[in-house]
């Protein structure tokens, strides 16, 4: 795997306010990378730096081999962006919103039909954008961000304030795009979403990356290694440690047919974040 983008000791200040500091990470080609943090943590600022909309105060931002923001903007034909603001033309139809974008990017308008099918909007092609539900608007914006088949896709909170059905549809679409080879960088404050979708996640808190890794490995790292056992004759669950003493207890219960169920007790990403930062998302 090769690195598709990276940040090295990046700092971003807005006048006296430090929005990001000492941000270092890299994203490998082909992965879904989650950038997680509460509101105000610096997620959108990070995406703006990575798409050439802002310049770092110091440190290095590198995207597909380019490190200067003008140069990053010039590779926008290989990059897709779903920003945190709509940017749809409310009075244009679903189709025309995409047609406009297709023309700008030199994409054949024939691509629009299949894409509308793909995001479940084919029957709404003639509908004015302003009449779409929130979930449909978001799917239209995703369609627009992938119309030119970018190999790198940035999504700024793609499912925030969407209902579970729309969220699920978007997750399916992102998985499919990723399978086809699209590298995805997404921000979210939804830890469950990150856990399900992302190969790796970074936790951002108050402008700093406080942890980074594979969700399953982070859960093991922060696990207290206890095991929950449900026993036949005991109404309350019993917690034992994952060690020799716990093992012999478990062995004895199992041998006497006492054990109804055994559960490992890894913390959720949410709990890990809370423990690291003292704050909820
Ligand atoms: N253009 C700007 N001017 C001044 N402060 C800004 C600007 N953009 C963002 N900030 C500040 O930087 C911090 C990070 O913002 P942002 O990246 O939007 O966070 P997030 O997307 O994680 O909610 C916030 O404190 C925000 O108020
Ligand atoms: Mg934001």
Image (cartoon, rainbow, N blue to C red):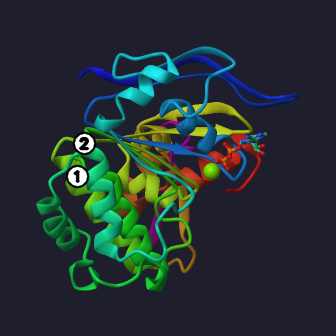
In reply to whether residue 233 is colored magenta, the answer given is no
Q: Are marks 1 and 2 in contact (CB under 8 Å)?
A: yes
Instruction: Please name whichever residue, 64 or 186, is drawn nearer the observer in this view of the structure.
Output: 64
Q: Earlier in the sequence, mark 1 or mark 2?
A: 1
Q: Which residue shows up at 58% across the image and 40% down it?
A: 203
In the drawing, does residue 143 fall left or right of residue 85? left
- What is the x, y in percent for residue 90? 49, 74
Closer to the camera, 240 or 179? 179
User: In this rendering, would 21 be left or right of 156?
Assistant: right
At 62% from the left and 31% from the top, the residue drawn is 209
Pinpoint residue 239: horizontal percent, then vertical percent.
Answer: 55, 58
Crowd class of label 1 (few under 14; some 14 to 19; many from 20; radius 10 Å): some
Specify whether residue 116 is in view. Answer: yes
Q: What residue occupies the far right of the structure in this picture? A: 16
Q: Which residue is mark 1?
A: 177
Q: Residue at x 60, y 44 (%)?
A: 44
Residue 182's disc is: 2
């Amino acid at each position: 795997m090769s690195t598709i983008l990276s940040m090295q000791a990046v700092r971003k200040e807005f006048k006296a306010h430090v929005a990001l500091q000492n941000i270092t990470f890299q994203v490998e080609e082909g992965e879904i990378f989650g950038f997680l943090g509460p509101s105000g943590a610096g997620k959108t600022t990070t995406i703006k730096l990575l798409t050439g909309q802002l310049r770092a105060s110091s440190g290095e931002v590198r995207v597909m081999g380019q490190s200067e923001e003008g140069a990053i903007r010039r590779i926008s034909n290989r990059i897709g962006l779903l920003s945190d603001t709509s940017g749809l033309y409310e009075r244009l139809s679903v189709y025309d919103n995409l047609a406009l974008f297709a023309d700008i990017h030199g994409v054949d308008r024939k691509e629009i039909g299949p894409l509308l099918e793909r995001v479940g909007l084919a029957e709404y092609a003639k509908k004015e954008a302003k009449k779409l539900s929130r979930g449909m608007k978001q799917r239209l914006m995703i369609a627009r961000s992938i119309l030119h088949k970018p190999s790198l896709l940035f999504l700024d909170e793609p499912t925030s304030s969407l209902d579970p059905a729309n969220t699920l549809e978007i997750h399916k679409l992102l998985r499919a795009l990723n399978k086809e080879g699209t590298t995805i960088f997404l921000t979210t404050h939804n830890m469950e979403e990150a856990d399900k979708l992302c190969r790796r996640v970074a936790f951002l808190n108050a402008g700093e990356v406080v942890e980074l890794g594979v969700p399953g490995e982070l859960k093991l790292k922060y696990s207290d290694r206890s095991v929950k056992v449900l026993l036949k004759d005991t109404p309350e669950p019993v917690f034992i440690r994952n060690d020799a003493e716990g093992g012999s207890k478990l062995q004895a219960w199992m041998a006497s047919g006492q054990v109804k169920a055994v559960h490992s007790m890894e913390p959720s990403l949410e709990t890990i974040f809370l423990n690291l930062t003292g704050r909820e998302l």
